[in-house]
Image (cartoon, rainbow, N blue to C red):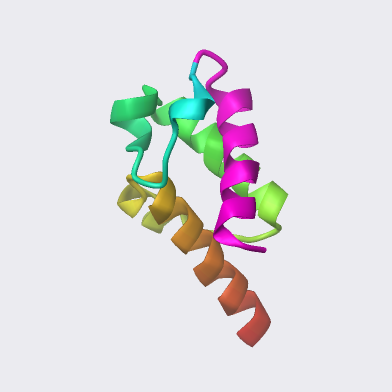
Amino acid sequence: MSDQEMMQELLKIIHVCLPETETENVTMDTVINRDLGADSMSFILMMTKVEAVFNVRIPEDSWKNLATVRDVIKAVRKAQGNQNNG
């Protein structure tokens, strides 16, 4: 799956978790809490949906390092790599 395809899936997740967000303005460098207004509960919901959609497990202790959309995509890629190598 390309980064663009992953981005499209993330936009769907963002729309579900943060329905008031204008997803057409979301970029790879969008900061999730500052730019999207995600609080801790909506972030947790978003990450659980990310894990379900991409069929990965991202360790919760690494979630605090996920600031941007790009960070989430990198974390998904890393988790996919760990599954393929594990």
33 relative position to 57: left or right: left
Taking the magenta stretch, the answer to whether it contains residue 61 is no
User: In this orientation, which residue lies closer to the viewer: 1 or 56?
Assistant: 1
Quadrant location of the C terminus in the rendered image: bottom right
Work out whether residue 22 can be spotted: yes
Query: Which residue is farthest left?
Result: 34
Residue 22's spot in the image, x, y percent?
A: 49, 20
Kindly identify the residue that appears in the image at 50 percent across and 70 percent down: 78
User: For residue 80, what is the image quadrant?
Assistant: bottom right
Work out whether residue 86 can be spotted: no
Is 53 rendered above or below residue 42?
below
User: In this orientation, which residue lies closer to the viewer: 18 or 56?
Assistant: 18
Residue 2's spot in the image, x, y percent?
A: 61, 62
Residue 14's spot in the image, x, y percent?
A: 55, 31
Taking the magenta stretch, the answer to whether it contains residue 2 is yes
User: In this orientation, which residue lies closer to the viewer: 48 or 5?
Assistant: 5
Query: Principal SS element in the magenta part?
Result: helix
70 relative position to 65: left or right: right
Kindly identify the residue that appears in the image at 58 percent across and 42 percent down: 10
Q: What span is in magenta? A: 1-20
User: In this orientation, which residue lies closer to the viewer: 41 or 10?
Assistant: 10
Kindly identify the residue that appears in the image at 66 percent across and 81 percent down: 84
Residue 50's spot in the image, x, y percent?
A: 61, 46
